[in-house]
Image (cartoon, coloured by chain):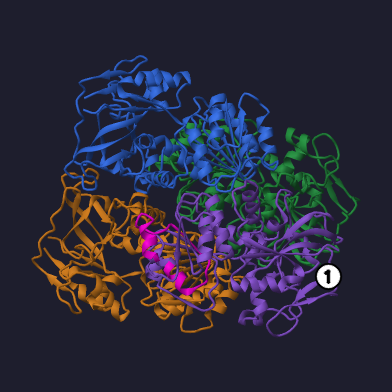
Chain colours: A orange, B green, C blue, D purple
Amino acid sequence: MLAVRKLKNEPGLWLERNAPVPQIGPREVLVAVTHAGICGTDRHIYEWDAWSKSRVKLGITTGHEFVGRVHAIGSAVTRTAVGQRVSAEGHIGCGVCQPCRTGNGHICEKVDILGIDTDGCFAEFVAVPEENIWPVHPDIPDHIAAIFDPLGNAMHTVMAAGVSGRSVLITGVGIIGLMAVTIARAAGAGKILVTDVSPRRLELAKKLGADVAFDSKDDTWPATARELTHDQGPEVLLEMSGHPKAIRQGFSALRNGGTAALLGLPSEPVPLDLPNDIIFKGATVLGINGRKMFETWYQVENFLLSGGLNLEPIVTHHLPLTDFERGLKLMQSGEAIKVVLEVPKP
Amino acid sequence: MLAVRKLKNEPGLWLERNAPVPQIGPREVLVAVTHAGICGTDRHIYEWDAWSKSRVKLGITTGHEFVGRVHAIGSAVTRTAVGQRVSAEGHIGCGVCQPCRTGNGHICEKVDILGIDTDGCFAEFVAVPEENIWPVHPDIPDHIAAIFDPLGNAMHTVMAAGVSGRSVLITGVGIIGLMAVTIARAAGAGKILVTDVSPRRLELAKKLGADVAFDSKDDTWPATARELTHDQGPEVLLEMSGHPKAIRQGFSALRNGGTAALLGLPSEPVPLDLPNDIIFKGATVLGINGRKMFETWYQVENFLLSGGLNLEPIVTHHLPLTDFERGLKLMQSGEAIKVVLEVPKP
Amino acid sequence: MLAVRKLKNEPGLWLERNAPVPQIGPREVLVAVTHAGICGTDRHIYEWDAWSKSRVKLGITTGHEFVGRVHAIGSAVTRTAVGQRVSAEGHIGCGVCQPCRTGNGHICEKVDILGIDTDGCFAEFVAVPEENIWPVHPDIPDHIAAIFDPLGNAMHTVMAAGVSGRSVLITGVGIIGLMAVTIARAAGAGKILVTDVSPRRLELAKKLGADVAFDSKDDTWPATARELTHDQGPEVLLEMSGHPKAIRQGFSALRNGGTAALLGLPSEPVPLDLPNDIIFKGATVLGINGRKMFETWYQVENFLLSGGLNLEPIVTHHLPLTDFERGLKLMQSGEAIKVVLEVPKP
Amino acid sequence: MLAVRKLKNEPGLWLERNAPVPQIGPREVLVAVTHAGICGTDRHIYEWDAWSKSRVKLGITTGHEFVGRVHAIGSAVTRTAVGQRVSAEGHIGCGVCQPCRTGNGHICEKVDILGIDTDGCFAEFVAVPEENIWPVHPDIPDHIAAIFDPLGNAMHTVMAAGVSGRSVLITGVGIIGLMAVTIARAAGAGKILVTDVSPRRLELAKKLGADVAFDSKDDTWPATARELTHDQGPEVLLEMSGHPKAIRQGFSALRNGGTAALLGLPSEPVPLDLPNDIIFKGATVLGINGRKMFETWYQVENFLLSGGLNLEPIVTHHLPLTDFERGLKLMQSGEAIKVVLEVPKP
C-alpha cells in the first residue's frame, strides 16, 4: 500500500508505494483511510526538530487525523462492523492504569500516539484498537471528520475552561486557536479577544467570530484587553501559542478569579510571576492534553450537528496523499491553515 | 406619591395617589422608579390566591421589578450616588446567616422580598438597602433594565444547569421559559425543545430559538423528545411550568446522567418515581430560587451587552403605572407576555 | 460445579451440585470464587418479590459480590493473568453508548447486572468480561474484598455528596447506611446524624462514628436534627432507607443550599413538596446508581489501605456457600448485617 | 493606648504607649483586642524586606490576626453588639467590584489589608468594618480564635484542592503548612507526605498526622514520593514553601490529573516546565489567596467544633503584647512556631 514514512534520520518524509498493510490483532480494526489532516506535529517530524528526534522511531508511518471505512476487524471485535465510516482517537492508553480506568485515558502515562509511537494514517490502511474507533455521523462531511483530532483539542480546551457568558482571550490563533474561536462563539462566549503575529490569521479569527484582534508584537495589548473587559481583564485565557512571552502576557491580562487553559507547548521553561499571575489572582490553571475519551468527541459531534461551527475557512487546501510534501510546504509558508489529504481510491 | 397597594382582603389592587414617600435608614437608598415590570407574583396578589392570602400583608405596595434613578441616600451609604440609574435585587437577606455571608443570600431563611414583605416598586419611589442596588449599564434600555429580576431567574436556571453544547428541554414557556429559550441559545445550547399548552407561546419560543415545540397536552411528546436527542433524551431539563404532569414527563424524558433545574412551583405535592426518574438515571436535580447575588446579575449584563439575547418579542406591552389593572388583565387573557409600566414624570 | 440458582417461579433459591462451569468468550475471564457477599437484592430474589418476578430470569445463578482467583482467560484477554486475586464490577455496560464511552458505564441504559441478568457468583466459578475485573490489593483481606460492591455503593454516595467538613444526615442504616457512616467519618465529615427503626443498627452506627442516632418512628427527629446543626439543618442528606416518609423528613431537615444523595429505592411514587423541599432551598439532589467505573473502586481501595474504615462490625457472619439459605434467614431475622459466604476449596 | 507601630524606614517595630484610639465610621466596629497572633508578614515588616519597603506606610499599626471584644459600634451598625467576642477578616474589599459582589472579596483588586494598609491589631483597640467581623463560637478558646487568619489560609488551600480520599503532598511545613497537615488529616486525606528543611518542623508534621516526612534538601524525595503513592505520584500538591525548587519538585511529583494549590509566595519568577509539569499531566493549578469570605471561616469553625484539629503543638509561645520583639526573635531563631500575644487588661 501507499504510506508516508519517516525513513531517515534527517529532515523529510518519504512515500513508500509498497508498504505492507498493517496486521491487526484480535481487538483491532483495519481502516481504509479516505481523508487525513496534516497536523503541526507531522510538520515537526518532517522538519526533524529536537523533539521529533528524541521521540519518533525511524520507519514509522506518520499521521493521526483521519476518516475512512472499516476494512477488516479482529476476531474479538464486537462493536464495529466492516463498512462503517469511522475516525479514531489517536491516544492509545494502556487500559489498566487509573486514568485509563476512570475515563481519563488521554493522560495515561504509557499512552502510545498514532503516527508517533505506532504506524499512523498517512497510508491506505491504518490499524487501531476497537476501543479507539469513533463512528462518524452521516451528516458530517469527510474533510471535517478527517480533522476531529485537532478540533477535539480545541473543544477540550474551550469546554474545560468554560466560556459560556464569559469574556475570552485566545493567545495564538494557529489552526487550533482558530478552531477555538468558532467553538467559543458557538459555546456562548461573551467578548472574544485574540492575539497572533500573523495579520492573515488575525483577520480569519475575526471572520470566525473574534471581536478584537491584537498584533502580539504590540506590547500594549494586555492593557487594551483589560480595558475592553470592564477594566478587569478577560475571564478566560485559552493559551494556544506556546510562546513564553504570550503566556506571561496572557496571565498578566487575566482577571482575578479567572481561568487559564494551557494547550500551547513552549519549548523551554517559562519563568512565571506566580504571586501576581496566579496566586493573588486566585486563578485556576488547567493543563490541556489531547481529548477526553470520549466526552470531547461527543461535544464535537453535538456542535457540528447543531450547525454552530464555521470550519470551512480553516480547511484551506485539499490535496492527494501523494502530494503530502506540497501540503507541508504550504503550511511552512503560512499559505495553508489546515491541509486535508485524500487517499486515492484503489 | 402614586402607589399601587393591596388594601383589602379581596381580589384587586388599588392605586393610592397620596401614599407617603418611604423613609430611608442610614444604609438605604431611595430610588425614583421610572419603569417596572409586572410579575406573575403581582398577578397572584391581584387575584388574591391562597398563597397571597397566607403571605402578603395588607397595605403593602406591590411590585419588585424596576429601574429608576437614585433620589436620595442614607447617611452611611458610600457606594451609590444620587442620580445613578439603578435596578435592585428584590431579595433582602438578613446579612448575618451562613448563606448571606457566603454569596448565597438568595437562599437566606429570613429573606424579605420587595413588594411582598416590604413596600415595593409600583410607586413613584421605593426604598432598598444599598447592598441590593445594581447600577445599570448605560447601553441597556430602560424596559429591559426593568425586568432584570425575571431575566435573572431564567439566567440562574440556565447557567446552574449548564447548557453549553448540551440538548435542552424547557417544560413551560411562560415569561421566564421564553427568556430561558433566548438565554440558552446565546449560552451555547445544542438542540432546544420546548413544551407548553399555548400555541402562541410555542410559536414565540421557536422565534426565540427553540428547535422543536411540543403541545404539552399531547402525551407522546416525551417519546419524540427522546428520539430527537440521539434516542437518549435531552441532557438538560429546565422545568418552568410548575405542573405536576409536565414535571413527571420532563423527568421521564431526561437522559441518564442528565441535569434537571427546577424553577416552576407546583401548588401541591408531586408524586415522583424516584428510582426511574432520578436514582437509576444518576440524574442531578437543582432547586432554583431567585438569583445568585450578584453573580447572576453580572451574567445578565454580560449577555445583554454582547447582544446575544432577543427580548423584544417578550415585552409585549408598555403602559403607564396608572393603567396597571389593564396590564394585569392583559396577562390574564394571555394577550400580554411581559407588561412594563412607566411611572409618569413629575 | 456448585451453584445457587433461581430454579422455580416461587420463593426460594436452590443449590445445584452439578451446574456446568460457565464458558468464556475471547474477552472474558473465568474466576474461581472464594468468597461472596449476600446482598439485599439476593434476598429479594429469594423472597421472590414483585420486582424479582418482573426482572429475573428463571435458571440464573445469583450473587454479584465476590472475590476469587482468575482460573482461565479468553483468547483476547491481555490485562489479566491466571492466578490473580480479583473482584469485579457487576454492571456490564454495552460499551458503545455515550455513558459507557465517557466513564459512566454504571448508567448505561442497556446494562446487564451479574446475578440478575447473567449468571452470578454464588458458585464455584463465574465468568466476567475482562473490562469488569478489579485486581485486589494484597493488603485487603478476602472478606472485605468480597463486599466491594456494596462498599462501592456507599462510597459513591458519600463522595458524590461531598462530606468533608459538612454535617451529614444518613436516613436508614442498613448494610450500606452503616458502611456510609464509617466512610463519611473517614472522609472528613463533621457531625453525623443517623436514623433507623432498629435500635441495634442505631447502636452499631454510633459505634462506627455517628454522633447522634434517631429512632425514625419518633416524628420529632427532624426538628432535633436541625437544632443540632446550628439551627439550619444538616448540609448533606444521604438517603439510604427507600422509605417515603424518611425521604420526606430527610428533605425537610436538609439545610438551604444542601446536597441530598438518593440511594434507597422506594417501591412506590413519593409525593414531594418540591417548592419547600428542593426549590426554595436551592438544594442539589443526586441520584446514585451503582459505582462509578472505576473511580469509586479506587476510592474504596484508597480508604481501605489508609486504614480509616471500620468494617469488621458490619460483616457479622461467615458461612459456607452451601449454607446460603441460613445466611438469608439470618438477614431476614435482623440477626445478621452482612453475611459472607465461603466457597469450599476443591 | 498601646500600639506596635512601624515608625522608621529601617528594620524594627516600635511600641507606642500613647497612641490614639482609632476613630470609627458609621459602619465600623471598635474591638478591644485580647489576643493577637504574630504572622510571617509581621516579621517581614519587622525585618523591613524589599516587599515591606514597597508596600507598608510608615506609622501604621501592624498585626492582623486577633480576637477581642466589641467595645463600640458605628451609628449604622446593626448586626454586631457591644460585648460580643469577635475576630475579623483582615481583607477589606471595596464592596462594589465583581469579586466583592459575588462572594469573592478576597480577590478584590482594591483590597486593603489590616496591619498593612490600615492600622492593625497589635494594639489595645482596632477598628474594622462591620462586614469583616466574625463572631467567635464560645467553645473556641482565645488563643485559637486569635489565629483564625492563618488557619483560614490553610483551610482555604486544603478545601480548594479537595483532599478527601486522595494522597497529599505538602511542600513546606511552616506555620500554615503544619496547620494544613492537621486539617488535611481531619478532612479525610489519604496518605500525607511533607517536605521541609527543618527536622523539628518535619517531626511536628508527623505528630500532626503526616505519614512520611522528607528532607527537602535530599533531591531524591520526589521519586520516593511517587513510589509511595502507587508509583503515580500524590494526587494533591499543597505548595506552602514559596521556594522555586520545591515548587518545581512538587510539580514533578504530582500525579497526572492531579491538583496543585499554590499558597507560598516565591520572591522571584519561577521557571516552570509547563508541558511536563502541567499540560501533559492534565493538572489543575489553583492560586490561593487569603480566605473565602466567609465560606472558609465557617469551615474553620466546623472543623474546630467537631474536634478534629490538633493545633496546640503549633501555638508554641504566649507572650504579653509588650514582648512582641521577643516573639519576633523566637520566630527568627526557629524556636517558636506560632506566637500569640496577649494584650494586658486595663
Q: Which residues are magenta?
A: D221-249
Question: Which amino acid type is shown beneath numbered disc 1?
Answer: Pro
Circle 1: element type: loop
Q: Is residue D27 left or right of residue D159?
A: right
Q: Position of residue B159 (x, y in %)?
A: 56, 53
Q: Position of residue D148 (x, y in %)?
A: 67, 59
- The answer to which image quadrant residue C276 occupies is top right
* Nearer to the camera, A304 or C152: C152
In the image, is residue D26 above or below residue C62?
below
Q: Chain of mark 1?
A: D
Residue positioned 86% across, 57% down in the render:
B24
Q: Which residue is mark 1?
A: D22
Q: Is residue D223 magenta?
A: yes
In the current view of this chain or complex, which residue is farthest to the top?
C10
Q: Is residue C337 magenta?
A: no
In the image, is residue B22 above or below residue C224?
below
Q: Position of residue B320 (x, y in %)?
A: 78, 53
Residue A161 shows in the view: yes
Q: Is residue C335 left or right of residue A3?
A: right
In the image, is residue C261 above or below residue D155?
above
Residue positioned 62% across, 40% down in the render:
C234
